[in-house]
Amino acid sequence: MADLKDKVAVVTGGSSGIGRAIALRFAKDGAHAVIVGRREEALREAAAEDEKISYVAGDITKNETVAAVMAHVRDKYGRLDILVNNAGWCPVKPITEMTIADYDSAFELDVRALVNMTIHALPLIRSSRGNIINLSSVGSTHRAKNLSMYQGAKAAVDNFTRVWALELASDGVRVNAIAPGAISTNIWNVPGLSAEEAKKHQDGIAAGIPFGYFGTPEDIANMAAFLVSDEARYVSGGIFAVDGAMGAV
Ligand code: NAD
């Protein structure tokens, strides 16, 4: 367990999947966690799991949501120790079917929102000599068809992580990324499949994982808890695989 008593964390996309597990883990370890997402109902339900979780509803690709998150953090807590840039998504299609709107939607969320959130969180994170964790993917270094927008965006995330770690080292701010493999969350739900087809689809993916099964959001939360703990005090600029050996191939 990391000792996060009295620390304050922001987790984007924290109402479901990996972000929700990270926020809950941070709260269990003593931190106040602010989750950000578009669906108020889902945020309220996630925040109900621990009284140390609060939320801001909004689309983080919008500048006004980023401003609202920082206003909430300043007004309610007056400090920020941890930023987890977790929200992410991509269109799944080949370049032959891609439109520039697909590029815009992937890069606005996976890249622009992550940069915008980081820029606005930095004054407080620098004051607390805090931590930034970016969610990358095994896909940033292992290519697969139909995922070019995602893999391009996550490759950018890897390099932001490394360069920001260099730039912020003298401020005592650590910047790391987690690169999940296949983790059981909504991101794998393919719309329009029957239950039987969905199972076949998931079994096919699991067969390609050296461990033979999907990881859980808690597997990622365990790594996040380590990275923000004092045990990781000398760890910065790393991209940490949590992927059942998928990235070792
Ligand atoms: P998820 O769909 O459960 O979570 C993504 C969250 O981001 C959701 O809560 C969603 O509402 C939120 N979100 C999306 N767009 C948003 C926006 N514009 N504004 C605010 N919130 C928004 O998926 P997940 O699997 O938990 O993904 C979390 C991160 O992990 C993503 O960056 C994803 O790319 C990365 N990742 C996941 C896997 C995996 O196998 N699940 C693998 C590699 C990387």
Image: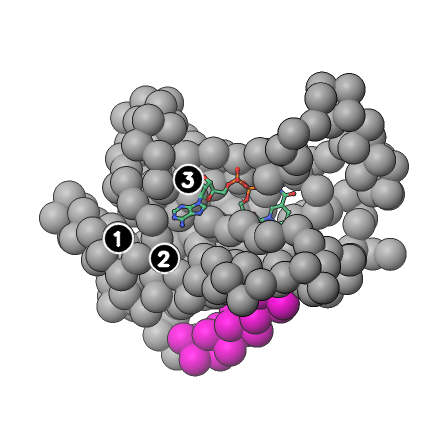
The amino acid type found where label 2 is placed reads Thr
When asked about the image quadrant of residue 24, the answer is top left
**Disc 2/disc 3 C-alpha distance (Å):** 15 Å
Residue 230 image position (x, y, % from top left): 46, 53
Instruction: Look at mark 3 in the image and give the residue it sits on.
Output: 14
Horizontal arrangement in the rendering, residue 28 relative to residue 157 (left or right): left
Point out the tag, 2 or 3, that comes first from the N-terminus.
3
Does the beta carbon of the residue at mark 2 sit less than 8 Å from ligand 1?
yes
Q: Residue at x 22, y 57 (%)?
A: 64
159 in magenta? yes
Which region shows up in magenta?
152-168
Instruction: Look at mark 1 in the image and give the residue it sits on.
Output: 65
Q: Are marks 2 and 3 in contact (CB under 8 Å)?
A: no
The amino acid type found where label 3 is placed reads Gly
Which residue reaches farthest left?
75
Q: Residue at x 35, y 66 (%)?
A: 116
Between residues 223 and 101, which one lies in front from this camera angle? 101
- What secondary structure do most residues of the magenta stretch adopt? helix
**Disc 3/disc 1 C-alpha distance (Å):** 14 Å
Residue 42 image position (x, y, % from top left): 38, 28
Tally of numbered tags: 3
Q: Nearer the viewer, mark 3 or mark 1?
A: 1
163 in magenta? yes
Q: Residue at x 78, y 33 (%)?
A: 201
Q: Residue at x 29, y 45 (%)?
A: 58
**Disc 1/disc 2 C-alpha distance (Å):** 8 Å
